[in-house]
Image (cartoon, rainbow, N blue to C red):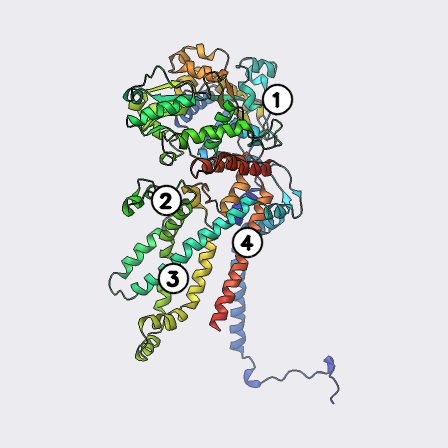
Amino acid sequence: MAIAATLAVVAAGSAACGGGSDDAAGGNVTITFWTHTHPPMIDLNKKLIAEYESKNPNVKIEYQTIPNTEFNTKMLTSLSTGAGPDIINMDDNALRGEYLPKRLLAEIDPKAFGKSSVGEVEADYVPGTLDGAKDAEGKLFGVPSEFNGTAFAINTAHFKDAGLDPAQPPKTWQQVVDYGKKLNAAGHKQAFNFLYLHSGWYSQNFQTLANQTGGSIVSADGKTANLESEGTKEALRLWVELARTSGISDPKSSSRDATAPFQDLASGTQSMAIVYPWSMDQIKESNPDTYKNLAVVPLPQPTATSTPVNRVYGYFWAVNNASKQKAEAWKFISYLASQKERWLTDVSFVQPVKGWETSAPAKAMPFIDVIAQSYGTGKYDQVGPHWAEVQDTIRDAVDAAVFDGKPVDEALREANEAVQRSIG
Amino acid sequence: MTAPTRPDQASPPAVNPRHRPSGAGIRRRRRVHRRDLLGALLSVPALALFAVFAIYPGLRVFYLSLFDYSLTAPPEFVGLDNFRFLATDPRFRETVLNSIFYTVGTYLPALVLALLLAIVLRRMTAGLGWVRLLYFLPVATSWVAIAVVWRLVLHPDGLLNQTLGLDVTWLSSSSSARWALVIMGVWKETGFFLILFLAGLARLPAEVHEAALVDGANAWQRFWRVTFPLLKPITAICTIIAVIRGFQSFSPQVVLTDGAFGTEVVNQFVYKTAFESARMGRASAVAVLMFALLIAVTMVQLRVFRREDS
């Protein structure tokens, strides 16, 4: 198996490029387009593809969806053998960590957006939101299909059971602990839990806390592991306090099914959780009864006087650098990006163009004020080459501290050495 | 002393007239020759496929282990750097130890259990087919399907805890996650070896047992002095297969724990290094080391069994 796993890529090494023919000036063009799986998004993509094809009879879009757990691996191996799609829809972690340093993507084509320069394209978006698709030199390689910021969900029915006022949600993590104890006393044993699904989830939760406590995983230049800094230690201490020491819930009973990440909140088992806009949409679909009782409030902060800090991330449409029909691919992306209101209405995906929150569909969205606020105070994750190894290391450190009771300093010292080996 | 004969002076080999090929013999030989040639020709496509999809990629892995190859840039020769890195890498060392723990923990009990069950079951006269089928079902089911079911069994409120009256968080603790994998592994793999041992027992000559019985040997003596030694060839095969299957383990770890809580095995490490971290050279080096390790272990096993046989 060890050899067989390695052979798969080697055997594929000579695969032909999937780019098709050169840009056809008026001729027939076939564009391949890959996304991860998210049913409402897939439905809208299919509708938009059909519309685009009917408006452009010479263009055929071949749309393929790939399960989330396989998406990064399949995309990276395909792109590396020149067999990837023309258009990819990828999260900013993968873009900045692997795709941009390896020059796998094409720079944005402003003409496809009816603009004369990249600056004009950027001017349409909320400042900073496009940073997830920029390389170290500041060049832009994609536009967002969705943009997410962290928020906090509370189950108002549970709050009422515990004699808490849902209109006064916790503003600090200490209040989460205090409220959690009251929720426990009212019979809600899972007051608050982090999500322990896979390394990526561990890493994003950890970076959310580290953003708030002034910690980081690596130094600003990405060359030195920084897990033993005081801010980073504080982030893990906070995690351990919330998950283990306070006793407001049992992390071992947390659902670990990555296909239904917010299962405990959705089923009414858990009272409070860190959420994203799309997660509320999922809960609305799967558990409408619980959804009615949920309120989305700003993410708690370390102290009441802390400047609010959140985590943001985005998925971007981008074009394969090996594509032979880049211009046509960007035109189709421009069409997808122009349907901003439908992305909001049908899928609850926010495209962070200036003034998006004042549009009619945005105003109709619940909790929009909280989400808009989180964008203004959000930070993208740190990321770098071979980041999967770093994420595994963070997972191991959190597991050791939370589940096995290893002292935070010791867990982070070991993790720091491992991260240094990965990036060194 | 006789002078050495020059080759050109050597007399032709004597031909026994009785062995001189007859016309029919020559024709038969030609038929056989043609048949062999046809057989060789027919096997060419299969051999070509094997060479292209097994031998060449296998050799390529050895070659790549000497390179730094990130999939998206041309491989860069680094000599033995990948091996040097692995020699001091705690994560690699831990995955090897995890693989050894899983292999020994799962396959030693599975082999012993399979042998005991085979000895008990071979006396069954009715329903043996059904019992064999029952034990073989987990073997025939995919690891992923089994692991998904066992996630429910191993849940804190799952069947295992409820049945045994335990309060163990099997999959979210470094002290229990590796044992959870072992328990599931024993359950799944015992049936495979049971079938092999049953086949081995069925081939044992009954007279030897009868002779031992006549000599007054008790049940343990008959097993230890007669059955077990006669089963050596099957035991050797089972042990070799067990080690290979143990080190090939991948799916149960991925589905049950994703390698967390000290359960990451070598194959998972190879997969992550190659496909998630895009370090193909390093992953190839791990594959080469594991190949060498498995060959060495298999040779030792064969030698041990041969020595015991002699």
Which mark's residue is nearer the viewer, 4 or 1? Answer: 4
Q: Are marks 2 and 1 on the same chain?
A: no
Residue A158, x across and y down, in percent: 30, 23
Residue marked by disc 2: B145
The residue most toward the left is: B126
Badge 3 sits on which subunit? B
Residue marked by disc 3: B196
Q: Is residue A324 visible from the viewing direction of this image?
A: yes
Q: In terms of depth relative to the viewer, which is nearer, A396 or A322? A: A396
Q: Is residue B133 left or right of residue B251?
A: left
Spatial separation of the CA atoms under disc 2 and disc 1: 46 Å
What type is the residue that disc 4 sits on? Phe
Q: Secondary structure at mark 2?
A: helix
Badge 1 sits on which subunit? A
Spatial separation of the CA atoms under disc 4 and disc 3: 25 Å
Mark number for residue A139?
Answer: 1
What type is the residue that disc 2 sits on? Ala
Q: Secondary structure at mark 3?
A: helix
Q: Is residue A308 left or right of residue A289?
A: right
Badge 4 or badge 2: first in the primary sequence: 2
Label 4 Cα crowd, 10 Å radius (few <14 / some 14-19 / many 20+): some
Q: Is residue A24 visible from the viewing direction of this image?
A: no
- Circle 4/circle 2 CB separation < 8 Å: no
